[in-house]
Amino acid sequence: MFLSDFGYLDPYVGIVKGAIKSSCNVEIIDLSHNIDSFKLKSAQFILKHSYKYFPEGSIFLVVVDPEVGSFARPIVVKRKNYTFVGRDNGILTFDNDFKVFSVDEGFKDVSATFHARDVFAKIVCKIINKKINLTKIESFEKFNIEEVVFSKDEQKGEVLWIDKFGNIITNIKTNSNNYELVINGFTIEKKAQYYAEFKESFFAIEGSFGFLEIAKYQDSAAKILNVKIGNNVIVRSKNESNN
Amino acid sequence: MFLSDFGYLDPYVGIVKGAIKSSCNVEIIDLSHNIDSFKLKSAQFILKHSYKYFPEGSIFLVVVDPEVGSFARPIVVKRKNYTFVGRDNGILTFDNDFKVFSVDEGFKDVSATFHARDVFAKIVCKIINKKINLTKIESFEKFNIEEVVFSKDEQKGEVLWIDKFGNIITNIKTNSNNYELVINGFTIEKKAQYYAEFKESFFAIEGSFGFLEIAKYQDSAAKILNVKIGNNVIVRSKNESNN
Amino acid sequence: MFLSDFGYLDPYVGIVKGAIKSSCNVEIIDLSHNIDSFKLKSAQFILKHSYKYFPEGSIFLVVVDPEVGSFARPIVVKRKNYTFVGRDNGILTFDNDFKVFSVDEGFKDVSATFHARDVFAKIVCKIINKKINLTKIESFEKFNIEEVVFSKDEQKGEVLWIDKFGNIITNIKTNSNNYELVINGFTIEKKAQYYAEFKESFFAIEGSFGFLEIAKYQDSAAKILNVKIGNNVIVRSKNESNN
C-alpha cells in the first residue's frame, strides 16, 4: 500500500518497490502516486478515506513532502489493525485513535534526496521482519482535513480533492438537505442522489467518501467553475420560510 | 485483470484493489484505467483484443459507465476459460459465444456513487470463493465494435482507438491491398508492413489488433489529421484498371 | 521488472503482462512506462540507475525502440545477478561487465508491430523456465550515457532526464564544489545539499542518481529555463583566485 507524490513519469515508484522487494517479501499495491506535489491535505484525504478498505494488517507507506521547509523525520503510526510509515508532517495523524513512534535505527548509504528508497523502504521491511526499534512519542505534527468552521447557519470548509471527472470534493458533511453551497462566487442549489440525476445544471451530492461534492453531468465542474484544491466552500442553511 | 475509466489521478483504482484483497486472495493486474470516460466502444475494443493473452481462468473486472443515462445492473459474462464482471451496457457482449448471468445477491453499505468498491469488488471475490448466486438471462444489452457497413466497393467503419503514439486504429479489416482509405477528408494510399517503412507520408498498416491503422513515422497521425475516437473511416476498393 | 515507452493510456502494458503470466509464473513490477518515445538514452539512464535496487536474480524486460530505423533483433544481456531482455540497440550495454547473447528460438504468430507481446514476453518466460537457446555474441550496439567530454577546465555533458518536479538531471559528476554550470545560456552558481536549501534561486545539487541536477525550490527548473532532454550542459571549474 504505497501512496506518494512521485507521479508515473519517473522511475521513482519502481525503484522504491525494488528496494522493498530486495529487503523483504511483501505484496505492494499502489494507492496513488499522483498526489499534487507538496499537498499534505490531499494526501491525508486519500489515506483517511481509503485505508479501511485494505486488508487488516496492511502497512501504508506515505511519501509526500511538505509545502514549506525540508524533510521531517520518519515516524510510524499505529491504528487498530493498520500501520502507517511516513514523515512527521501531520498527514498520518488524522483522528484521535492512534499511537506515534519514532524510528530508532541507523540507515547506511542515505542520499540527501531520495529517502523513500534509502530509508522508508527499509523501515517497511524492518516492520515486516519484526526487527525495528520504535519509541512511543507524544509530540508530533497533527492536522485534520475535516476541520470545518461552524457558525449558526453556515459551515466554512474547503476543497480537498478534484477527481479525474472534475468532481469537486469538499471537507463538509451535512445531514440536512436544506442548504445552498457557495464556491468561488457561484451558488449551487440542486442536490442529487446520483450523478446522472441532473443533466443540465451543477449539483451537490454526497460522494463515496461521505463528503459533499459538486458535480456536473459528463462535464468537469472544477474546470467550468475554475475551482482548485484548497478553495473555500460555504454551506449555508436555508430556512424553509425562505423558500 | 482490471479495466476501468478511473485514470491514475485518483485513489479509486487503489481502493477497489484494497476492497478485493480484503475479501479474497487473488492477484490483480491492471489492463488499463485510461479509457476515455464514458466511451463504451473503446472499452470493448481493449477488452476484446486483450483478454485471450491472459491466463485461462482469469476474471476481468470492467467498470466503465455509459455515455447516456445512469448505472446499469451488474452482470457476469462467461466465455470459454474466461469470466467477465461488469455492467449490462453491452461492453462485455462482443461475440456470440458467451452466457450472461444476473447476480442474485444483496450487498451491504452500498454508496450511490462507488459501486466498483461496494459491489463489483465483492462480486469478483464471490466468484473466486465460489459463493455466488447467478441466474442465466437471455435479455441484455449488446453491441459489437466490429460492425462495419459494406456496400459493393466500400466498407464504412469508425475510429476505435488512438494510441499514445497517435496511431489511429479503425474497426475495419481487409485482405486485399488494393484500396484507399478516407478519413476526415484525407485520402491515405500508402500501405506499410511495418511502422518505419515510410518516413514521410501517412500510411495504412494492419496493426497488432488485426485492424487497419493509420500512422505516420515518429509522428502523431491523429493530431495532424485531427481525428478523434468515433470518427468515420471509409475503405474503398480500387479497380486495377483505375491505377 | 518491466520498462517501456508504452505509456499508461493504452492496454499494451497490461497485454504484455497477460502474455507473460500465460507462459510462466513470475511477479511483474513496473519500473516505468513513460519513457519519452524513442529516447534510448533516457531508457538507459533509468535502467542503469535502478537495477541494483531490485532483488538479485531479477529479469528486466526493456522495450523502447530506436530514434531512427526499425526494430533491432532481441538480445539477452547478463550482468552479475541480473538478466536483461531487450533489443540490440545499445540501451542494455552500459558498462563493461556483461555478456551479450543472441536468442536462437523461433516464435509463432508474431505480428509485425507488437513484439513485446509476441516475442519478448516469451523470451522472459523461456529464461524463467530455463528453456532457452542462447549464443554468446561479441558484436552488438553499445553506448554509454555517462560519456562526457573533458577539457582542462570544462566538462561537456547533456540532460538525461527531467523529472515530474522539473528537476534537470545531467550526466555529469563532480567531486569539487568549485564550479559553475551553464545550460541553455543560463549560468547556475549556487550549489545545494538538499532541495529546500535555496528558496529563491536555481541551484545545482548532487541528486539521488549521483549526477548533478539543476533545480528550483517548489518550481520546475526545466520549464523556466526551457530545457529539454538532450540539451547540452557545461560544468566549468572556477579558480579560487577568480572568486
Image (cartoon, coloured by chain):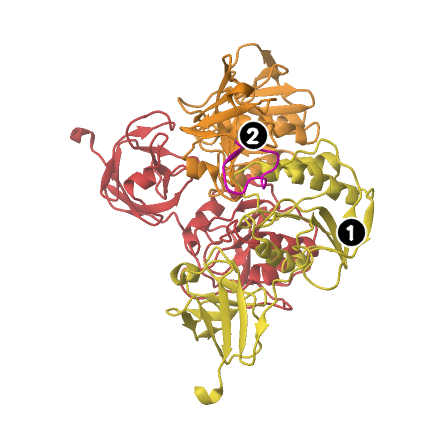
Chain colours: A yellow, B red, C orange
Q: Nearer the viewer, residue B83 or B204?
A: B204
Residue C111 falls left or right of residue A147? left
Residue sitting farthest toward the bottom: A241
- The answer for which chain carries disc 2 is C
Taking the spot 44% from the left edge, 32% from the top edge, the residue there is C37
Real-space Cα separation, disc 1 to disc 2, in angstroms: 35 Å
Q: Is residue C192 magenta?
A: yes
Q: Nearer the viewer, residue A195 or A62?
A: A62
- Image location of residue B198, percent across then percent down: 32, 26
Taking the spot 56% from the left edge, 69% from the top edge, the residue there is A172
Query: What type is the residue that disc 1 sits on?
Result: Phe
Residue A124, quarter of the rendered image: top right
| Magenta span main SS | loop
Mark in the foreground, 1 or 2? 1
Residue B14 falls left or right of residue A165? right
- Image location of residue C14, percent across then percent down: 54, 41
Q: Is residue B86 magenta?
A: no
Residue sitting farthest toward the top: C138
Which residue is labeled 2 in the image? C46
Residue B88 falls left or right of residue C82? left
Which residue is labeled 1 in the image? A101
Would you say residue B129 is visible in this rendering? no
| Both marks 1 and 2 on one chain | no
**Is the Cβ of the residue at disc 1 closer than 8 Å to that at disc 2?**
no
- The answer for which chain carries disc 1 is A
* Span highlighted in magenta in the image: C190-203
Q: Under tag 1, what secondary structure?
A: strand
Taking the spot 83% from the left edge, 42% from the top edge, the residue there is A131
Taking the spot 40% from the left edge, 21% from the top edge, the residue there is C69
- Image location of residue B131, percent across then percent down: 69, 60
From what the image shows, is residue C86 above or below residue B78?
above
